[in-house]
């Protein structure tokens, strides 16, 4: 089984590696896994320590050259290698890589429309090509890939790419059966302010109706549109949940109920 797991930087604490135990157990059972991680809070914390105020437009970090350098330092350096070290404590052979390595992710600059104008938000990218051979080579040697979403453009320039989308594109390229997104929200919510409004099960065909009827709104709309693209790309199942649900990874893959939203084709 091929499974891509994405979790946020908030899950990564070098003094608390118990959250990785379900991942370790699944890997030791022979599954082909790749871990993709974010790190929004750690990047923002470092920027603030250095006197640089984080700035977001439509949920995307405005990334000038200094911010890009800091982002790559945190994601591809500190957090990526911290995760590798945490897996090593469990006796797992892991390899920390980024989208820049072996051309894993090729991206182009992203521009957005804001208040009627197209805005350049700096070195932010959209993935346009995935070359998964490096991950497949690591799998062949039973080395667990830990992937930072930092990508390169066609000229080798670093671009900051959303970790959810990086995980999604990797899942499609590897023809993974499952994509698990452990995020800062408990799943797809009918009301973003009410965790009890969780939608437990969804099919791809239901997504347009949810948007059309206004049942979901705000930042959940682009996430659901992304999910449609992933399912159309061949991934069989997507699961979105808060980071705490990672504890129940074995039950989740066994089809049992785990708090979160399970989305299928």
Image (spheres, rainbow, N blue to C red):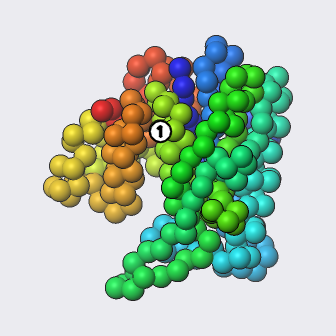
Picture quarter with the C terminus: top left
Element on which disc 1 rests: helix
Residue under the image location 48 percent in, 31 percent down: 175
Q: Residue at x 50, y 30 (%)?
A: 176
Q: Is residue 41 visible?
A: no
Residue 129 seen in the figure: yes
In the rendered structure, the answer to whether residue 212 lies left or right of residue 127 reads left
Please state the horizontal and vertical placement of residue 57, each as a whole percent of the image. 49, 74
Give residue 74's position: percent from left, percent from top.
75, 58
Asked whether 167 or 37 is in front, the reply is: 167
Q: Residue at x 34, y 85 (%)?
A: 116
For the point 71% across and 76% down, the residue is 65
Q: Is residue 123 left or right of residue 79?
A: left
The residue closer to the viewer here, 7 or 3, is 3
Q: Quadrant of residue 118?
A: bottom left
Closest to the observer, 116 or 99:
99
User: Would you name the residue on which mark 1 appears?
Assistant: 172
């Amino acid at each position: 089984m091929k499974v891509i797991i994405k979790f946020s930087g908030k899950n990564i604490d070098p003094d608390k590696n118990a959250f990785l135990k379900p991942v370790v157990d699944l890997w030791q059972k022979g599954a082909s896994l790749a871990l993709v991680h974010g790190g929004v809070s750690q990047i923002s914390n470092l920027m603030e320590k250095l006197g640089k105020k984080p700035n977001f437009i439509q949920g995307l970090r405005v990334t000038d050259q200094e911010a890009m350098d800091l982002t790559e330092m945190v994601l591809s350096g500190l957090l990526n290698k911290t995760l590798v070290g945490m897996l090593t404590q469990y006796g797992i052979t892991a390899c920390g890589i980024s989208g820049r390595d072996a051309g894993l992710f090729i991206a182009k600059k992203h521009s957005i429309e804001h208040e009627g104008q197209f805005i350049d938000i700096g070195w932010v990218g959209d993935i346009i090509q995935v070359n998964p051979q490096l991950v497949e080579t690591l799998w062949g040697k039973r080395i667990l890939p830990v992937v930072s979403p930092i990508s390169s453009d066609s000229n080798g320039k670093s671009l900051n790419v959303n970790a959810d989308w990086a995980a999604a594109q990797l899942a499609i390229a590897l023809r993974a059966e499952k994509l698990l997104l452990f995020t800062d929200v408990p799943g797809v919510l009918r009301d973003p302010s009410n965790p009890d409004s969780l939608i437990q099960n969804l099919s791809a065909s239901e997504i347009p109706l949810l948007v059309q009827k206004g049942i979901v709104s705000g930042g959940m709309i682009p996430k659901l549109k992304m999910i449609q693209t992933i399912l159309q790309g061949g991934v069989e199942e997507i699961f979105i949940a808060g980071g705490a649900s990672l504890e129940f990874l074995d039950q989740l893959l066994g089809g049992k109920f785990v708090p979160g939203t399970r989305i299928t084709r």
